Amino acid sequence: MPLYEFRCKSCSKTFDDKETFAEHDKHPELKCPHCGSKDVEPVITPVEVRTSKKS
Ligand SMILES: [Zn+2]
């Protein structure tokens, strides 16, 4: 499952918010949980974590 990450331009902190993303249509304005700023941008991280391979 991909992880949707956002970065706050105000405090430069990143956060993932799956719930908010799921309701993106209803709540297009995201807020930073750290400082409450709405100046956030989505960060698409090409994460490919393969944990199924155990040797
Ligand atoms: Zn912030």
Image: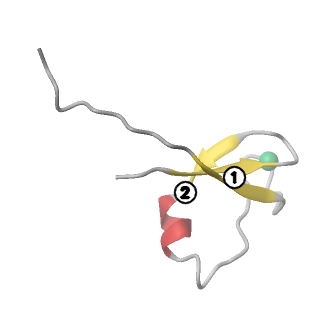
Amino acid found under the numbered disc labelled 1: Pro
Cα separation between marks 2 and 1: 9 Å
Residue positioned 73% across, 62% down in the render: 31
Q: Residue 16: which disc?
A: none
Circle 2 residue: 17
Percent position (x, y) of residue 13? 74, 39
Up/down of 13 relative to 16, above or below: above
Q: Comparing marks 2 and 1, which lies closer to the viewer?
A: 2
Query: Counting other residues with Cα less than 10 Å from the Cα at mark 1, is it few (<14), some (14-19), or many (20 or more)?
Result: some
Amino acid, disc 2: Asp
x, y percentage for residue 23? 53, 77
Residue sticking out furthest to the top: 55
Residue toward you, 4 or 35: 4
Q: Secondary structure at mark 1?
A: loop
Front one among 21 and 2:
2
Element assignment for label 2: loop
Q: Which one is earlier in the sequence, the residue at label 2 or at label 1?
A: 2
Q: Quadrant of the C terminus?
A: top left
27 on left or right of 36 = left
Residue at the location (81% across, 63% down)? 38
Is residue 55 depicted above or below 52 in this figure?
A: above
Disc 1 residue: CB within 8 Å of ligand 1: yes
- Residue 31 or 54: which is nearer the viewer? 54
Whether ligand 1 has any atom under 8 Å from the Cβ at mark 2 is answered as no
Q: Mark 1 — residue?
A: 33
Looking at the picture, does residue 38 appear above or below residue 3? Answer: below
Q: Horizontal and vertical percent for residue 16?
A: 56, 50
CB atoms of marks 2 and 1 within 8 Å? yes
Spot occupied by residue 9 in the image (x, y as percentages of width and height): 84, 48
**41 to the left or right of 9:** left
